[in-house]
Image (spheres, rainbow, N blue to C red):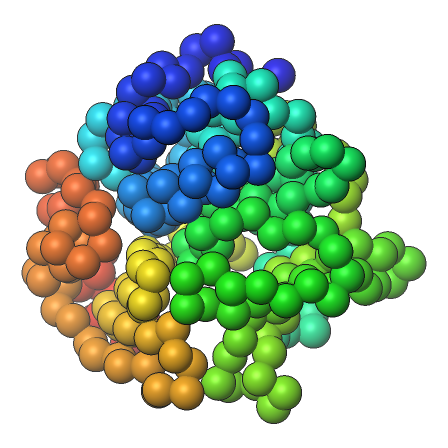
Amino acid sequence: MWHSEELDLDAYLAHIGYDGDRTPTLGTLRTLQRAHVLSIGWENLDAFLHGHVALDLATIQDKLLHRGRGGYCYEHVTLFAAALEALGYRFTAVSGRIRMGSDKILPATHAMLVVELEGRRWLCDVGFGASLFEPIELADGAAFTTGAWEYRVQHEEITPGADGWAVYQRSGDSPDGWLSRHATTLNPQYPIDFAVGNHFVDSNGRSPFVTRPFIQRILPDRLHILDGLTWTTQLADVSIPPETQTVRAEEVRKLLDDVFGVVISDEDAALLETKLTDLSANGA
């Protein structure tokens, strides 16, 4: 279903620096997810610059494994799903609703996987940007850490009449210290469903990803975010306020390479600088 026969599994594993056991166990899954998150960047530049993000596996492999680019959730999950399928894992794709503290019902446009292992279900979220380094067991009230980052998962009503799972992260901005990050039901999704969601995210005028660049990189001790021309660094110790600075349009290409691990072509770099200059001039 996820076109694993088209995946160059050896190239993928080499790119993320994984040379361990290929048996479909929880230990392998944990190591794979951490390696994937730390090795492949997260960015929406194709949506912002070109209004289109391709989800065929050949394009994703070329972009993420060979051209030094990153991608957003649909690309990450399509690649990760192909790898898990090739390795023999059983899993279901799901779509989540981003919350980040909001109580609005937002579109279910965040792609994730639920892996089944020995009667337990594990949520793999490799495409969030501030992605988790390990799978989350879907167990109500479970608290866990990945590196220095703290999370918990809760079974609750996701939308009126629909129960599911919500992931919370430790936050210094929330009254109780926890921020509702995203939530999902376990309604199975398929590549065609991701294609529909991706069409909204990469081209609809209501999608924030077509109006500005949004790039993230999570590390064991910090999270870097570039939102337009605003660069924010949040430490894993959320009691320490984030550092924020404004960068110039002409500085962004080097920042992408040096801090975010994203390499772009000369043509895209020129277009990005032009569009960022226009955003800055319009006060965006």
**250 to 125, vertically: above or below:** below
- Residue at 41% x, 87% y is 239
Residue 103 sits above or below residue 218 on the image: below
The quarter of the rendered structure image containing the C terminus is bottom left
Instruction: State left or right for residue 115 relative to residue 154.
Output: left
Q: Residue furthest top?
A: 5
Q: Residue 160 location in percent, x, y? A: 87, 62
Please name whichever residue, 156 or 107, is drawn nearer the observer in this view of the structure. 156
Give the tally of numbered discs.
0
Q: Is residue 205 visible?
A: no
Q: Residue furthest bottom?
A: 175
* Towards the viewer: 248 or 211: 248
* Location of residue 244 with respect to 11 vertically, above or below: below
Q: Position of residue 143 (x, y in %)?
A: 63, 67
**Is residue 242 positioned above or below 138 on the image?**
below
Q: Position of residue 203 (x, y in %)?
A: 47, 43
* Residue 105 screen position, x and y as percent: 71, 63
Whether residue 185 sits left or right of residue 275 in the image: it is right
**Quadrant of the rendering where the N terminus is positioned:** top right
Q: Residue at x 69, y 73 (%)?
A: 103
Looking at the image, which residue sits at the far right? 161
Residue at left 8%, top 60%?
250
Q: Nearer the viewer, residue 82 or 281?
A: 82
Residue 267 position by quadrant: top left
Residue under the image location 61 percent in, 52 percent down: 136
- Relative side of 168 to 58, left or right: right
Does any portion of residue 131 appear in the rendered image?
Answer: yes
